[in-house]
Amino acid sequence: MSKMSTVQGRIVTFLLTLWLVSLLTFVVFQVIPGNPAQVILGADALPEQVAALEKELGLDQPLPQRYLHWVGGVLRGEFGHSLRYRQPVRGLMVASLKVTLPVAGLAFVFIVLLGIPLGLTVGKYHLQKRGVMFSVVTQLGTAVPSFWMGILMMLAFAKLFRFFTPGAFVPWEEDWLAALASLIPPALAVALPKVAVLTRYVSTAYVEEKQAEYIRTAYGKGLAEKEVLYTHLLKNILIPVVTVLGLMTGDILGGSIIVEKVFALPGIGRLLVEAISFRDFPLIQGITLYLAGVVVFLNLLVDFLYRMFDPRIRWSR
Amino acid sequence: MKRRFSPYYLLFLVGIILIAAVFLKGGKEERENKVVVVVPQDPDYLDPHLAAAAGTYEMMFNVYEGLLKPAPDGSLLPALAERYSVSEDGLTYTFSLRPGVKFHNGKPVTAADVKYSLERLMGTATGQPLSPFFTKVQAVETAGTPGAQKVILRLKAPDAALLSNLTTAMIIPEDYQELNTRPVGTGPFRFVEYRPGQWVVLEKFADYWQEGLPLLDKVEFRIIPDREAALIALKNGTVDIYPRIEPGRITELSEEFYTLQEKQNLVQVLALNLKRAPFNDLRVRQAINYAIDKDELIELAAFGFGTKLGSGFSPAMVEFYETGLEDLYPHNIEKARQLLAEAGYPQGFRAVLSVPSNYAFHVDTAQIIVEQLKKVGIEAGIELVEWAVWLQRIYQGRDYEMTITGLSGKLDPLPVLIRYTSDYANNFFNYENAEYDRLNQLAAAESDRGKRAVLYKKAQRLLAEEAAAVFLMDPHYLVALKKTIAGYRLYPIYVQDMSTVYLTNRGTR
Amino acid sequence: MKTKVSLSLVIGAALVGCFLLMLVVSFFYTPFAVNEMRSAERFLPPGRPYLLGTDNFGRDIFSRIMKGTQTAFFVGTLSVLFGMALGISLGALGGYFGGWTDRILTQLGTTIQAFPGVLFALMIVAVWGPGTFNTIVALSITAFPGFMRITRSGFIQIKEYSFVEAAQTIGVSPLKIMLRHILPNLLPSLLVAASNGFAGALLAEAGLSYLGLGVQPPEPSWGRMLNEAQGYLLRAPWYSLAPGIVLVLAVLGFNLLSDGLRDLLDPKQ
């Protein structure tokens, strides 16, 4: 990446990546077996019925034409219509993103809210003996897959509160508060393993930074402990934290997709799995492009943030 | 991007956790006279003549009706036709329309509507039939006076399955163009709303021709593809009826629920590709039949909720069912080994068992069958295939060695048993037998039900003796309902009849 | 600092050792036949003779977990090896030659990493169907950009060193320079990455099998067991707990091992 250091270069890479992703997805799903018309109509449908639906869905058109048509639509901001639902892809995606994004967002908040204070506390009282224990504990946290964490939580909820079944997702329109409440357990399941990771990073960064020269200088200047902590230390710890959070977002999104299955949530993961099983090409294309776009965009964002926060640049000022 | 969300959630976070508890505990308002049924999939078309998916028929059964209608025991009831008569030669069917029947849009049903509907299905005007079932119908005529209208069907050749096929020939208003967005039929419920991926809502049709029906004001079909989510929804009260609940899960249901079960007229079958060695050898197929312990299979895979089969037909259709075949190949490992040895496989052989991965029930069945076959020396390896791939490669392409699937039953034996005739498009068994074909042809032209039954029973026996496949079981249709719901009726076909369902204690919970 | 290093390493190595032992033993002995079904003994809680209880088919869960070690290590080892081989060769190519080769390869890596891992595996499985081999392919492909990145940056760095330049001026072939002079210097960081990658592969395999896309039944896999167990979570909670705990311990072992290795081998310290 170092060669493409300019902003323009990064943006070109961003667009190039998205284009490659879309091309790859398109080609892959045209090659694999499976006919959407047949799947929609079921095993008892007659060949004539299948052929009629194929024609209606435009599946009889040549491949390159379909791809160009699709790309043209995307450039105009149109993702086409789902073959199966006959609805705009965008609307279907928005509906399921209303589940996935809040889960990922909540998880993100939990990670930050729990990870940073924990990391600072651990870092502050960093002793060798506790360090070993801590290392094992955080590694344990990292080792727990989010879907198993979800299963554990389901079990705990079912045993503790007999009437509360997590994962019973209520549509937002119906009762937004209940909807939000039902997303908390899955968000926690995604967050907890990552909290362990963040705690590790923050505590390590804390210990390293505390030994840094400028901190000692700050203490030398007679600044109060708290002031040093908040004005100097925290700022510099932010860099690795932002980096690690940025790298995590892909995982958080992926984790949310698996955890959706545990809690049976109607999120983007389920939509994608269904789209694949129905060979709903426009929907598959839309979702992959979106997910890849988010991940690439966040990487880009982290890169820029990194530049903004770079300690050397700040310190030389 | 994410960070912009955070203040929003931070604010609510504490509040949510507190209020959520209150909300979850809090009671609900007085109940509407409404029932929510969970269904696994979206409808394919709302237009009944275009729809082909069983999942659509299951819901829209409440909206549309044909001249005849199926009864819970599988017999045919007069619906839009008050009565009918068939000529001696079986070529002329005369239907007298029930007077005073109205469509949901308030218009009365006329003979012209019936003619229009049937001709639309037959493709009389377009040349492209929408249904394959009426190719033997030559003409549809209307007759009678406005008060007593008649519809006459003239056939080219006798068609024994015509009457049961007419139950799926839904009658729609003549020249009505918005069927796919605003369906109009004559059923007990009228269509209100369809939201993709969420629900189909129906409401009571006050002018329904059957006196006193329906009993509910509203029916909602909640679309939940995930079985786990469906079960959760039932447990926490979001839905009231869960059709096709997994048998392993009913022990989890509390006192608030009850279940009904019945044979569902489905043939779960282990198909063997008869064009491939070693399955082209009758002895090998018989050996596999002896090797498989269906009782153990029903216990392990279906928790006992299944009926053993012996041929490609379910006892749900008592009238046409040939009894005794299920014991033709009693479980016998010795005999299986002996037959394999005779066929030249004393050490058994290896084979691939392809299973559609989306059907957990078939995947479980496959695991059990692999173990059972191992005992006679047959090493079967499971290959999971996606449903889309299964349909294309295995069902249509017939490229497989062994596979497991469920073949759904119909109101008439014809579409069930025709699957094994040599010229049937999706005869993925590759079964070819001239005698079998002949029996089916005879039965299709025979209008006497008793004589048809004899022919179809012979056909079933032939399938079993030839071991055309391993006919495993009819897994029972299990439905879980809240105890406050009564009047639910089970059918031998895939329908949710809501017309007789009612709530026993309205207003209280 | 030194004591911390070795303790992580010791715990990690001990855990990994236990699993290796279980792996070896499972080839010769399991308490019960792995796939044998007993309709009368389904859903038995942990106890005797079924140490960790039985599942919905009356199969012994402990035996299946033992056998599952084979699956986990098979998939983990092969996907790390393939991912490493691919990553090292492509990284070396890009890092050594630079220019357009480098740009194209880097773009390839970015494109692949742009897919969330689950999505990528979903696509692979859609193309070739689920199964052990395809799981390995999917995991190798998602793993290689990481190894590629390490190798590439290492090559760029070391390429500038005088001993490499010296070798170049003598006319030693690029392949020889790569293999003899540059790669050995990268071994420590690659080893750490491999140990880490192994833990990642265990998690990814379990996740895929949990989604029903990875290892095929009746082959026991920890993730697949969790998938099958979830339907009986309330009836047989031990079925969901046992494979999960084993999975966590295995991942923990490899993570600690890689932690320990890093501290031990990192030239910076």
Image: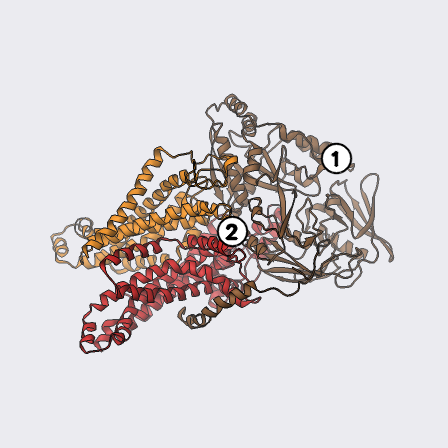
Chain colours: A red, B brown, C orange
* Distance of label 2 from label 1 (alpha carbons): 40 Å
Is B197 located above or below residue B388 in the figure?
Answer: below
Residue A63 in view in this figure? no
- What amino acid does circle 2 point to? Ser
Secondary structure of residue under mark 2:
helix
User: Could you tell me which chain the residue with mark 2 belongs to?
Assistant: A
- Tag 1: amino acid: Arg
Q: Residue at x 26, y 64 (%)?
A: A125
Q: Position of residue B473 (x, y in %)?
A: 60, 37
Along the viewing direction, whichever of B243 and B41 lies nearer the viewer: B243
Task: Tell me if residue A181 comes above or below residue B67 in the rendering.
Answer: below
Query: Mark 2: few, some, or many residues within 10 Å (few <14, many ≥20)?
Result: many
Residue carrying label 2: A277
Quarter of the rendering containing residue A121: bottom left
Pointers 2 and 1 within a single chain: no
Q: Nearer the viewer, residue C155 or B118?
A: C155
